[in-house]
Amino acid sequence: TQLLEQSPQFLSIQEGENLTVYCNSSSVFSSLQWYRQEPGEGPVLLVTVVTGGEVKKLKRLTFQFGDARKDSSLHITAAQPGDTGLYLCAGGVNTGNQFYFGTGTSLTVIP
Amino acid sequence: NAGVTQTPKFRILKIGQSMTLQCTQDMNHNYMYWYRQDPGMGLKLIYYSVGAGITDKGEVPNGYNVSRSTTEDFPLRLELAAPSQTSVYFCASSYGLAEETQYFGPGTRLLVL
């Protein structure tokens, strides 16, 4: 059972294009995190959102937490080759000290 | 600070063999986690610990054991390796509850043949 579904699973775009990655669930989460993982390395945290409807910006990356705290999106403006990597969302639940990770979106930005 | 370190980086096991994956953090974090990552499946939590002497099961604990005798170390034990345990294993730590940043190690790639 996969609590968090990410789409698309794979994405290949040209440098300078915009893109959006989605993270969806039927469950409510107390917080939602986005990580980026490069080949051969562990995930690195990009952002944590905790309030329904919350929007956070990190340079060219915009993160939004759904009003009902069941979904989230990551929007990248003017993608660059350095954005290439695996993007993972992870939802935290109040009942346990753990996160549930999504299936991941593999992004390739072509120069 | 070295952060979270894992050893070995890569290991091949035969079916039925046992091994211990080592994980050490030098950030004085209370919380530590073991995940496995399979292609197209994201990360699945195996076990976690909220402090020395306290461990609990995650989503996929079968076939694994852990211990937490010190704040720094959180080894993962595979007793009877099976092909289904072929995966990349990540250890992570955080200061507090789940909303805190999790810092991941570089991973251990395990192949069971």
Image (cartoon, helix red, strand yellow):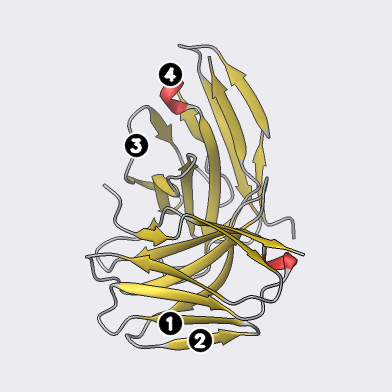
Q: Is residue A79 left or right of residue A89?
A: right
The answer as to whether the residues below labels 2 and 1 share one chain is: yes
Q: Chain of mark 2?
A: A
What residue is shown at x 51% (from left), y 33% (from top)? B87
Residue A11 image offset from top left, x and y in percent: 55, 59
Q: Chain of mark 3?
A: B
Circle 2 crowding by C-alpha within 10 Å: few under 14, some 14–19, many from 20: some
Q: Is residue A65 left or right of residue A10?
A: left
Q: Name the element at disc 3.
A: loop
Q: Chain of mark 4?
A: B
Q: Amino acid at mark 2?
A: Lys
Q: CA distance from mark 4 to mark 3?
A: 14 Å
Q: Which mark is residue A56?
A: 2
Q: Which mark is residue B82?
A: 4
Q: Amino acid at mark 1?
A: Gln
Relative vertical location of residue B24 with respect to residue A76 in this rendering, above or below: above
Residue A80 image offset from top left, x and y in percent: 72, 71
- One can see residue B48 in this view: yes
**Front-most of A17 and A89?**
A17
Q: Which mark is residue B20?
A: none
Q: Chain of mark 1?
A: A
- One can see residue B53 in this view: no
The mark that comes first in sequence, 2 or 1, is: 2
Residue A38 image offset from top left, x and y in percent: 66, 54
Q: Quadrant of residue B85?
A: top left
- Which mark is nearer the camera, 3 or 1? 1
Q: CA distance from mark 4 to mark 2?
A: 43 Å
